[in-house]
Amino acid sequence: MNLYDEFSWRGMVYDATEGLADVFPRERVTAYVGFDPTASSLHVGSLLPVMALARLQRFGHSPIAIVGGGTGMIGDPSGKSQERTLLSLDQIDENLAGLRQQLARFLDFDSATNPARVVNNADWLATFDLLGFLRDTGKYFTVNYMLQKESVHRRLESEDGISFTEFSYLLLQARDFLELFDRYGCTLQMGGSDQWGNITAGIDLVRKLRATKAHGLVMPLVTTASGVKFGKTEAGTIWLDPARTSVAEFRHFWLNTDDRDVIAYLKYFTFLTRDRIEEIEALAKSAPEKREAQRVLAHEVSRLVHGDDDAARVEQANTTLFSTTTLNVTVHEALKIADDLTRIAADVPSMTMAASDFEGHGMTVVDLVAHALKMSKSEARRLVQQGGVSVNDRRISDANARLTCADALDRRVFLLRKGARQRFVIRLA
């Protein structure tokens, strides 16, 4: 199977230039993906293009990741309704360092045959003078051509319009493609489907100035089956940096994948073989209640992003969490369970609350659920009344019930359960 076939069966081809499928079997391709340095960490929304580069390298081709120190000073209007806040040079440098470190988990920079590269487009874009850039790049694009691009057209129809700064982004990215062609023989750019206009502009510039056919491949913008933007949760963005999103929260995100999405995500975000994924799919259809597909997905992506040791530690902590029984335990058993839950708290969904909040008349179970699970009080009340909440394995359906320190394990830990699949440790301090 060549790389294009691999991309296709994994559902990673939204569109591609004509003839690209024939290129991979006959030559080693150098391809690039651009990443905006708007933060010091990538998020799960960036994982699909990262995996595309990693697959490309595993098939013997050469990957380049552009971390846009130059274009990051401008901001890509694609898919945006408003202009981004421009970053300072110091912010961009700090973000570049973080992104390079994360990309090293997926790409081999020391390969003897096809090493990966991380490049900063500020290395060339920052050296251009305005008149030189307009003469050497801008003259090859008509305004009519640029206005037809979806990213520009959509912004022109918006209330805020588009600034000349962002309007120029397409020219800068086109220049990136030309520079990478000249420096590294790069003939393919990949990205999300919203990048098609920028990619084809670069293809046109390479064709006009170097008389060479370049290619583009865009991947689908991932959304959930329920229509929510992938990677966006009630708690916020899911980052790859464990300082922003803990390994436990990261794993929990994948465990919560909808049954309708999980097989697609296994194809997108893991290196599991086709046979293995089809085996998991068959099991998911015959026994969906076991959620084996979600467990495999969470394990594979966690170890890719955070490494085997951290992934294994969090999995063991969750095994402890879900095997813990707290109903009708002795004082001595409650002490040990409280110690165990405190020990694993950093690696499972958990939070710390003030013990003083549970003194006197204590706190209502509705307030506890709303605070811990980040939901409104009306949602929490409804969940409790429907019997969806247990505290220390004791089901509570009375929305007016109150909890005090005396109800906590060893007066310092609550084990909150929502339904059958979610458990949450609450420590009192």
Image (spheres, rainbow, N blue to C red):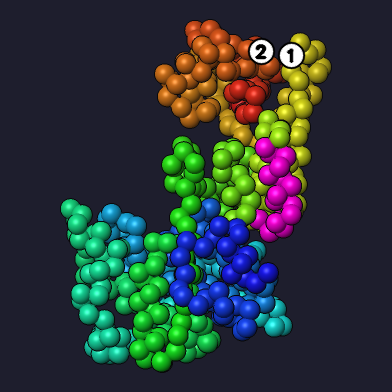
* Disc 1, SS: loop
In the displayed structure image, the side of residue 218 where residue 278 appears, left or right: right
* Label 2 element class: strand
In this view of the protein, which residue sits in the foreground, 223 or 21? 21
- Which amino acid, mark 1? Leu
Where is residue 310 shown, x and y percent of the image? Answer: 71, 50
Circle 1 residue: 327
284 part of magenta stretch: yes
Q: Position of residue 279 (x, y in %)?
A: 74, 47
Q: Which residue is mark 2?
A: 394
The quadrant where residue 77 appears? bottom left
Instruction: Tell which of 287 and 181 is nearer to you.
Output: 287
- Can residue 131 be seen? yes
Q: Position of residue 139 (x, y in %)?
A: 24, 86
Q: Are marks 2 and 1 in contact (CB under 8 Å)?
A: yes
Identify which residue is drawn at 67% across, 37% down: 285
First reached walking from the N terminus: tag 2 or tag 1? 1
Image quadrant in which the N terminus is located: bottom right
Residue at the far bottom in the pictured view = 210
